[in-house]
């Protein structure tokens, strides 16, 4: 099915769509919500926003969204619908309550914007008769069956901005800097930001490393005249603070550690994330109108694709280690 679908091509039983954001927020979630609302209204559907993810669903925190309600949010980070983590929704009772709220409010279909945990919730609802489509929204880029998740590009740009700034002071003081970045168990943020930011070394959970070899390489850089080093550490590898201490002990270098933390989750989404979110949000509406359910939207080779959530959750996530190797080569 084409990405842009006109009204004449649709034959829908769906009349009222819900949309929620769940799990960690990510820049671009608002753009996705806006797209769901505007594309739904374009097709004369009603769109209901559910606040605070599955928690708000169970509590019945619903609000009908009109065209104006999503004005002025495409450029904003965070999520207008708020987000939450909800343990109760992992239970059959919680899921049944959520499905009942949707039924009581005449909502036949739901767009869930979040990560793999949120998709598990969407799958559970689909088993209870609610049509669901998942949109990958997380800075971690840790979802299989898509090249990119919404928010990843913005987070990478935030990290690059930090690397550039830290490099100024690192050069001035001729110091070694360890920068810890987010990503949960995935090294994508560290790998891509490290490549684009010219980090001297990148440590990610997907690529086993030996600290002695890392230090040897840095030492080699020093001997050929490098005045500073930046080591980017994905949080999935361990605490940057600890790694910094070990490096200082072993080398005697002056080491400083920066943990970038939650600032990586905020900020205005990049053009890439806004466009990706807009495309995915709009297509989610089309898929629901076709009667599809329990699918996640992804992007591969700039084409949107829909994958069964079951299949997506069973697919191991991989990282392209050739990019990691390239970063190593370019930072010799
Ligand atoms: P993310 O969606 O970013 O992976 P979480 O793993 O925290 O974030 O999941 C977000 C929410 O999705 C959880 O708080 C919970 O409400 C719901 N969820 C997670 N796992 C499941 C599950 N196995 N079954 C049903 N709902 C789940
Ligand atoms: O999944 C997004 C993420 O920011 C991860 O990178 C990080 O490990 C985690 O969420 C932090 O979660 P919290 O916001 O609960 O501290």
Image: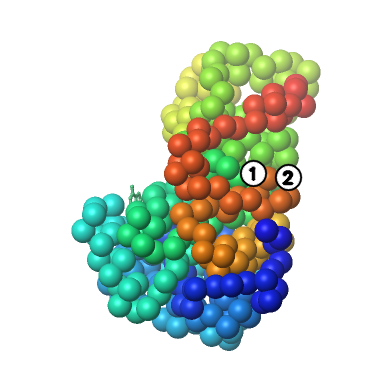
Residue at which label 2 appears: 301
| Residue behind label 1 places its C-beta within 8 angstroms of ligand 2 | no
Residue 279 appears in which quarter of the rendering?
bottom right
| Front disc: 2 or 1 | 2
Is residue 262 at least partly visible in the picture?
no
Residue 86 appears in which quarter of the rendering?
bottom left
Q: Residue at x 56, y 23 (%)?
A: 207
Q: What x and y, as percent, mark residue 187?
A: 55, 35
11 left or right, relative to 323:
left
Q: Residue at x 78, y 18 (%)?
A: 224
Q: Is residue 265 above or below residue 220?
A: below
242 left or right, relative to 3:
left
Say what secondary structure mark 1 lies in.
Answer: loop
Q: Is residue 99 above or below residue 192?
A: below
Q: Residue at x 62, y 72 (%)?
A: 10
Is residue 283 at least partly visible in the picture?
yes
Which residue is the extreme one toward the front?
A: 11
Residue at which label 1 appears: 147
Say what secondary structure mark 2 lies in.
Answer: loop
Q: Characterize the local packing of mark 2: few (<14), some (14-19) or many (20 or more) Cα atoms within 10 angstroms.
A: few
Labels 2 and 1 touching (C-beta < 8 A): yes
Tell me which label, 2 or 1, sits earlier in the chain.
1
Q: How is the image coloured?
A: rainbow
């Amino acid at each position: 099915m084409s990405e842009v679908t006109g009204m004449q091509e649709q034959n829908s039983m769906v009349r009222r769509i819900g949309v929620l954001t769940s799990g960690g927020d990510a820049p671009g979630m608002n753009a996705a919500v806006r797209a769901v609302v505007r594309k739904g209204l374009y097709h004369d559907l009603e769109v209901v926003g559910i606040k605070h993810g599955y928690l708000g669903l169970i509590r019945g925190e619903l609000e009908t969204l009109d065209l104006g309600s999503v004005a002025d949010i495409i450029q904003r980070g965070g999520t207008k619908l708020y987000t939450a983590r909800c343990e109760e929704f992992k239970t059959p009772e919680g899921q049944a309550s959520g499905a009942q709220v949707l039924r009581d409010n005449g909502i036949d279909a739901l767009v869930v914007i979040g990560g793999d945990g949120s998709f598990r919730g969407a799958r559970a609802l689909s088993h209870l008769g609610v049509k669901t489509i998942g949109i990958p929204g997380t800075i971690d880029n840790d979802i299989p069956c898509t090249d990119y998740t919404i928010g990843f590009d913005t987070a990478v740009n935030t990290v690059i901005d930090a690397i550039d700034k830290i490099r100024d002071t690192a050069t001035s003081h001729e110091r070694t800097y360890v920068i810890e970045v987010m990503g949960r168990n995935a090294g994508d943020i560290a790998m891509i930001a490290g490549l684009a930011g010219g980090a001297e070394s990148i440590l990610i959970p997907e690529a086993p490393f030996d600290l002695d070899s890392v230090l040897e390489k840095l030492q080699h850089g020093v001997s050929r005249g490098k005045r500073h080093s930046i080591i980017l550490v994905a949080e999935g590898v361990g605490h940057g603070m600890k790694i910094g201490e070990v490096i200082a002990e072993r080398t005697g270098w002056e080491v400083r550690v920066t943990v970038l933390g939650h600032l990586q989750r905020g900020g205005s989404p990049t053009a890439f994330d806004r466009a990706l979110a807009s495309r995915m949000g709009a297509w989610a509406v089309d898929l629901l109108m076709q009667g599809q359910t329990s699918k996640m939207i992804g992007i591969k080779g700039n084409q949107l694709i829909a994958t069964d959530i079951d299949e997506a959750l069973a697919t191991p996530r991989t990282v392209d280690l050739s990019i990691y190797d390239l970063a190593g080569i370019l930072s010799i």
